[in-house]
Amino acid sequence: MEKVLILGASGLVGRALIDEFRDGFDLYGTYSSSLTSLPDGKQFKLEVQQIDKLRELTRSIKPDIVISCLRGEFKHQLQLHKELATELRNSNSRLYFFSTTNVFDGDCSKPHTETDIPISESDYGKFKIECENMLKEILDERVMIIRIPAIWGKNSPRWSLIQESIKNKEMIDVYSNLVCNNLLDVLLAKRLRFIIENKLKGIFHLVSEDMMTHAQFFEQIINTLSNEKSILRYRFFQDNAEIRFFALKSNRDDMPRTLQCTNKDIISYLVRSTNGCMT
């Protein structure tokens, strides 16, 4: 049974990974503030600046697979990932690093595929690009880059915000000219498991099959949950009406159809999770 160490196991993605990987893997995880559902002895408190502790963990656990969904100050994250890669370099361990659509936020003229060269204007996107490049330089084919869009789940902050906004009749800003895609936490975990079990390599864009504007996605949710359509406040992204893209698409053909989804599938899953419509 392969040992899997999840860095950032108490977050939205980390919790979904624990649920998906619990059967079939020897799981370990780190957390910053909230405990995970892993048993004592398999979860460890780790702050992003605690590089010595990370080194101790990797040497004691000797993971076959490390999954990084860490959050924290960019400088500390970069240093920690560099140390992690250095520790893993002389082993057979594989690293799966979560990245983001933001690595392409410097070019919103089109959706971007795995073979496009990243270009970013945001600090977040620039940090992720630097981290991706550093990890590939040290680990080569033993690092897999997992780029993801907005992640939704029945317990996600995004979903909670919508429900609270409906309840309290609070406005939600939406962009009518910004085309996006999305993904569920549970489906992300299933796709990553498939990638790991089949030892697929390279860069992956794990997203919904289709795209829709940011406003359309929220409209469909609100139309299903409530009559409070007036809580949506429409805006233009980058202050003009031109269609812009904050979206990934994949040119890979190694992900099975059973693990694909549409934005409609995502919305249906989220609505079902409320156990009835809100009014």
Image (cartoon, rainbow, N blue to C red):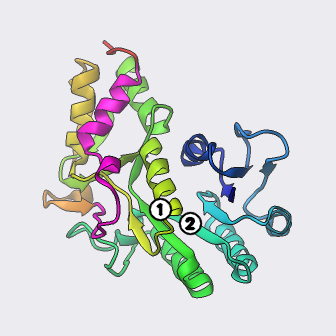
Q: Quick one: label 2, few (<14), some, or many (20+) residues within 10 Å?
A: many
Residue under label 1: 195
SS of the residue at dot 2? Answer: strand
Residue under label 2: 96
Residue shown at 64% from the left, 59% from the top: 72
Residue 40 visible somewhere in the drawing: yes
Whether residue 77 is in magenta: the answer is no
Three-letter residue code for mark 2: Tyr
Residue shown at 40% from the left, 16% from the top: 275
SS of the residue at dot 1? Answer: helix
Q: Quick one: label 1, few (<14), some, or many (20+) residues within 10 Å?
A: some
Relative to residue 149, is residue 96 drawn left or right?
right
Q: Is residue 120 above or below residue 212?
A: below
Q: Is residue 210 above or below residue 161?
A: below
Measure the alpha-carbon separation of dots 2 and 1: 10 Å
Q: Specify the label residue 163 is tagged with.
A: none
